[in-house]
Amino acid sequence: MTSNARELAQIPSTPSGRRNLLINGSMVVAQRGTTHTSANGYTLDRFNAFNSSGSGVWTVTQSTDFPSGSGFSNSLKIDITTADTSNTAFEEAGIAQLIEAQDLQHLAYNTSSAKESTLSFWVKSNKTGNYVVWFYIPDSTDQFSKSYTINTADTWEKKTISIPAKTSGGAINNDNGTGLQVQFMLLSGPSYKSGTMPSNWESIVNANRYVDQDVNIFDSTSNEFYLTGVQLEVGSVATEFEHRSFGEELALCQRYYEVQGGTTLTQFAHLWTGDVTNNQSYYQTVQFSVEKRAAPTITMSSAAQSSFGTPTAANTSRIATSGVAISNSTAARGYFYVGVLADAEL
């Protein structure tokens, strides 16, 4: 064997391309802010908190607690601020990420070539017991769920879940809608766990969703839950977490949500300096940093200067996936600043 051949043989084989089908699994991007009280909706980028637990209240934050030596710098933290021990009927709470359908076509679902996949993540809580991760495909209304156990309180543990290939029962559409929903459950009412845990993909049955979930994270204000290093990849083996640069992770997040002008709507970008004559208003384009998944919902704030008046949001015909045209309310000479929030979340 030549020297070059020996060197090549010693290089470990790793999958090429972007392996992690999830975005912001290291919890580093937080365009909406680092603290979300009474959380019900998107929190850290791409992670959606859902909570139908009655009187239970939680706060979701970007934490600097992470598993030592893992290469992470952040985690998503859940802190219970108002307890609820009722745990009745169809109550449910958890953290979810929705994956765009066209990014999942290589799974080849609904064919004989369908691929297995593997979910891996780091988790920590004072609340030991069994938790469930639920997978749902809206296009075919199929589900699969798997449980994992937090064994030791207040200790980071790495978990791995195998997801079977889906060879029949319907495909994931090749479009920009939701292809797969991944939910980390933290509470399940009895109506969601009175059946049988699925061992493979099956048509959705509410009673089978979260059968093994025996933890109610809301049963005490002492409860906390941490999550980071979340990775979903094709194949039956969990590989090392794919650490992407902050810039790449941010750009992936901005396909779904972007704040133009700063990190909040109170930080403005200079939009226009000029002269509009004959009492005519005008439209000026705000170009998004990243092409959006779909034409976004626009939220605006502005700091008007000189005599231009207050910028006003364009009508829907002037909102595109690449940018939005903003009009001024007064035609005159001057300049103004504007903050634009573009939301194209699934």
Image: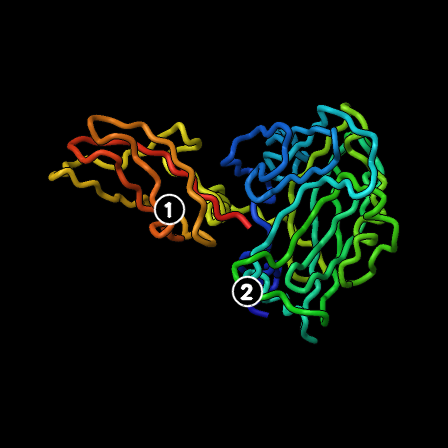
Left or right, 146 with respect to 316, comes to: right
Displayed quadrant of residue 282: top left
Q: How is the image coloured?
A: rainbow
Q: Position of residue 240 (x, y in %)?
A: 65, 50
In this view, which residue lies farthest toward the left? 278
Q: In terms of depth relative to the viewer, which is nearer, 289 or 142?
A: 142
Q: In terms of depth relative to the viewer, which is nearer, 231 or 6?
A: 231
Quarter of the figure with the N terminus: bottom right
Disc 1 target residue: 288
Seen in the picture, residue 220 relative to 255 is either above or below; the reply is: above
Residues packed near mark 1 inside 10 Å, few (<14), some (14 to 19) or many (20 plus)? many
Q: At label 2, which amino acid type do we have?
A: Ser
Residue 37 appearing in the image: yes
Q: In terms of depth relative to the viewer, which is nearer, 10 or 117?
A: 117
What's the residue at 61%, 64% (across, down)? 9
Disc 2 target residue: 3
Q: At label 1, which amino acid type do we have?
A: Phe
Disc marking residue 230 = none
Displayed quadrant of residue 140: bottom right
Residues packed near mark 2 inside 10 Å, few (<14), some (14 to 19) or many (20 plus)? few
Q: Position of residue 294 (x, y in %)?
A: 46, 54
Residue 152 appearing in the image: no
Q: Position of residue 36 (x, y in %)?
A: 59, 30
Name the secondary structure under disc 1: loop
Name the secondary structure under disc 2: helix
What's the residue at 60%, 44% (across, down)? 25
Q: Position of residue 209 (x, y in %)?
A: 79, 52
In this view, which residue lies farthest toward the bottom? 112
Q: In terms of depth relative to the viewer, which is nearer, 317 or 134?
A: 317
What's the residue at 70%, 28% (across, down)? 57
